[in-house]
Structures are given as structure tokens and as C-alpha cells.
Amino acid sequence: MDIIPKLSRFDLSMIVISLVIGMGIFATPAEVSVSLSNPFLYFAAWFFGGMISMCGALTFAEIGARYPTTGGFYKAFSYCFHPAFAFMINWILVISNAASVAAVALIGAEYMNPVIMPPALQNDTGVKIISITSVLILYVISLLGIKMSARTQNVLTLFKIGMILLLCTAVFKSNAPFAISHLNHPHASRNNLVGFGVSLIAIFFTYGGYQQTINFGGDSINAKINVPKAIFRGMLVVISLYMIINFAYYYVLGIDGIQHRPALAATLAGVLFGATGYKVISLLMFVSVLAFINVNIMANPRVYYAMADDGILPAIFKHINPKTQVQEFGLSFFVAAVLIILFFVGSFEKMMSYVMFFDTVGLSTAALSIFILRKKTKHIDVNSIYTIKWYPFIPIIFITTYWLVTLSIFIENPTAALICVCTFAVGLVIYFITKFSQKQKATP
């Protein structure tokens, strides 16, 4: 059963926004402010991260336009490089994406834990119970069908955007004092250059996810036009929202307040509206986390589909329910990976270095495919698809910056980097073992 295109440009735009805006923006500012206690550098890092991420988004927009297909993030690798290399990168990115979903589920659970759990469960155990339950609820919803998931996604994403705008509007209309006492906050122990580099680890984690949109090439109506436009429009909304909410944090809490408040949005609401506001925003944060989990449950099984289509994964990963357009086995496999990670990893901070090393290597390498793809698709009428302006500078800027962030992760956490490199190598071994096994079976 082939995948039938059902997603509109609006559906895709909502998907882009939800792929990027998980719960990171409600937690990572605390990480960034520890590395950059100077307010001007703090905002400069967020703006810089947004511009670099836009460069990446534009690069993947053209990749998606030139090679629109289901599981495009894998297929573009396979087409431009080699299926072995594509599998090595993508198998670990699927695990990385599962870890991102687990991280976001943990952040959402941390918001909800003090609101709904009894005192005895206001701890790591209670957080895990909430996070695992939320993933299972979204799993059931996703089984209802791709179009149903998209409609749910649209509602949750619009709700999330409205929530952020409402909170920020309340900040600027309130009498909350501007945190002027923090303008001259002393610098952190790191020097500015090192702190800026380290802060980008958390910032790029918060801006990441847009690249998964190209996995919906087979699901998208008029993918060559709608995928790139959705990526561009979605990222404009994301960057604008991130800058606004960061200023709201700083306006009310100051750099000191941001550093010591992991549940930032709820703390912000607590300052403005008291204990009731804290509880209401915590509930809204938890609802918004469902959007991020839902969209990843939609996107990642499409990579399995592409791998199964190439014969690397068993055919069962390609099986689609003809009525719902859902890969029931692939969906279940991804959710199982998320749940396993949630059982064994207890904190967002521990997860981030691993996730970002996978992402920086995977994204920067995937972006290189644009140079090969342009040569292999010279026959395409460029007037009918999106092409990057200021090529090749846009992809070069993106790739170079991500390599520098990869170096920052290696310096900051060499153990995590080494584990990640070994994991990539394991993927290569798995690929060749799989292909050898298939060859043996095919030999009479």
C-alpha cells in the first residue's frame, strides 16, 4: 500500500512549528543564561541561533523540493551518498529523535508534577509516571490515522502559539517591574567566547526539528511547492516567538531569575497572577507538550518506511493500514524506543549533550547533500521549485557553525561525544550485517 498525499500547506506549517517548539524554550533558557550571564550576549546568542537555524531550514527546504519523498531525510542521504552512510546517520537520528521526545516529555511532566501528583510522588518517579502516560495517550491518538493526527496537530499547535502570545501580552501589559538590577550582572566563570559556544548547544537543541518536515514528502499535496514554503513560514513564526518569550522572561525575572527557574513559563505566570496562574500555565504547558510528541510520532515512522523500502529494515516497517495511512508496527517501534529511554534516563540535562551531538553531526552532513543534489537534479525546472538565494553561502554558513558546535560538545563532554561516535559506527556494522544476511538468503 503506497502512501496517499493528504497533508496541505497549512498542515505542514503547523507540523514545522510543532517539530521545533517542543518544551525546550520553556527550559533551555535556564541553561543558556548559566553560560551567558551578560544580557546582551544572551539575546545575541538566541538571535544568532535563529539566523543559523533559518539557514539550515532554507537548505532543507530546497532538499525537500528537489527530492520530495516519504522518509526524505533518509532518502536524500541514500541518493546523494550511499545507503550505508544513510543508514549509519539515520538509525542514530531516529534514536536521537526518540530521546528528544523523551526529554520534552520529562520537561512537561516536571511542570505538571507539583500540580497533580500527591506529595509522595513529587519526585523523579512521579515525573516518569506522567511522562510515560502522556506518550501512551498520544500513541493511541496516532493510531486513529494520519489525517486525524494532522487535525489534532493543528489544534494543539494553534493552542500553543496562542498560549505563548497570551503569556507575553500579559507580561507587557502588567505592572511587573523591568529587571533593571540584572543589567550589570557579573559574568559567569566561562569567558564570553567559550560561554557563547556552549550556549549554542542548548539553543540549537531548541531550534531543531524542522529538517523532519522533508519526511512528509510522500504525504504532502504538491510537495515541491508546499514543503519549502511551510518550512520557511514555520521557522519565521518560531524565531519570532522565541525572541518575544525570551524578552518576557528577562523583563520579569532577569538573568538571575532565568538561571534558577527550570519551569520558566509557570514561574513567569506565578509572578504575574500568583499561585493560580502557576497552576494554569503548568497545565497549558503539559497540553502543549502533546503537540511535540504527536508530531514526532507522525514523522519518525516515515524514516522506517524509507529504510524498509530500500530493503534495510524488514518489510513490516513499510506496512501501512490502508484506511488510516498509519504504519502501525513502525509507530509502535518508535513509541517503544521513547518509553525505554524514559525508563533509563532521569533528566533533561543528561540527555541534551547526546541528542545534540547526534543532531549536529547528522544535520550538518545532511546539509552537504544539497551540493550533490543540485548536480544530480540539473534536469529539474528551477522555476517550478524553491531554490536557495545566496547559494552556496547559506548552506556553508549553516554547516560550518554546526561543526563548531560539535567541537564545543566534544570539549564540554568528551565522554558523550565518544559514545556517540561509537554508536554511529555500530550503525554501519548493522547495515553491512543486514545486507550480507539478505545476500545469503538470496543465494540458492
Image (cartoon, rainbow, N blue to C red):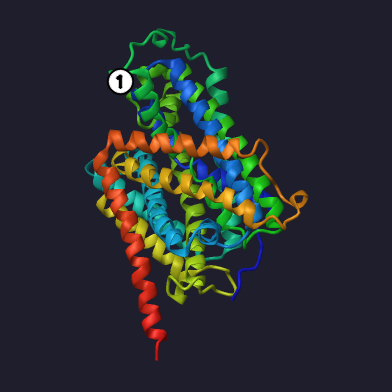
Which residue is rendered at x = 54% and y = 38% of the image? 396
Q: Outermost residue toward the left?
A: 120
Which residue is rendered at x = 41% and y = 46% of the image? 361
Looking at the picture, tell me which residue is in the foreground, 197 or 173: 197
On the rendered image, what quadrant is the C terminus found in?
bottom left
Coordinates of residue 243 in the picture (x, y in percent): 53, 26
Mark 1 = which residue?
A: 190
Q: Compared to 99, does 178 lie above or below?
A: above
Determine which quarter of the picture holds residue 423. Answer: bottom left
Coordinates of residue 440 in the picture (x, y in percent): 36, 83
Which residue is rendered at x = 72% and y = 58% of the image? 379
Residue type pointed to by label 1: Arg
Coordinates of residue 354 in the picture (x, y in percent): 33, 45
Q: Say what secondary structure mark 1 lies in.
A: loop
Q: How many numbered markers are drawn?
A: 1
Would residue 157 be seen by someone viewing this image from the given angle? Answer: yes
Horizontal side of 211 relative to 5 (left or right) equals left
Q: Outermost residue toward the bottom?
A: 444
Determine which quarter of the picture holds residue 222. Answer: bottom right
Horizontal side of 411 relative to 298 (left or right) equals left
Coordinates of residue 424 in the picture (x, y in percent): 34, 55
Which residue is rendered at x = 41% and y = 61% of the image? 334
- Packing grade of label 1 (10 A; few <14, some 14-19, many >=20) is some
On the rendered image, what quadrant is the N terminus found in?
bottom right
Would residue 275 be seen by someone viewing this image from the given angle? Answer: no
Determine which quarter of the picture holds residue 196. Answer: top left
Looking at the picture, tell me which residue is in the foreground, 26 or 439: 439
Looking at the picture, tell me which residue is in the foreground, 22 or 178: 22
Q: Compared to 434, does 44 lie above or below?
A: above
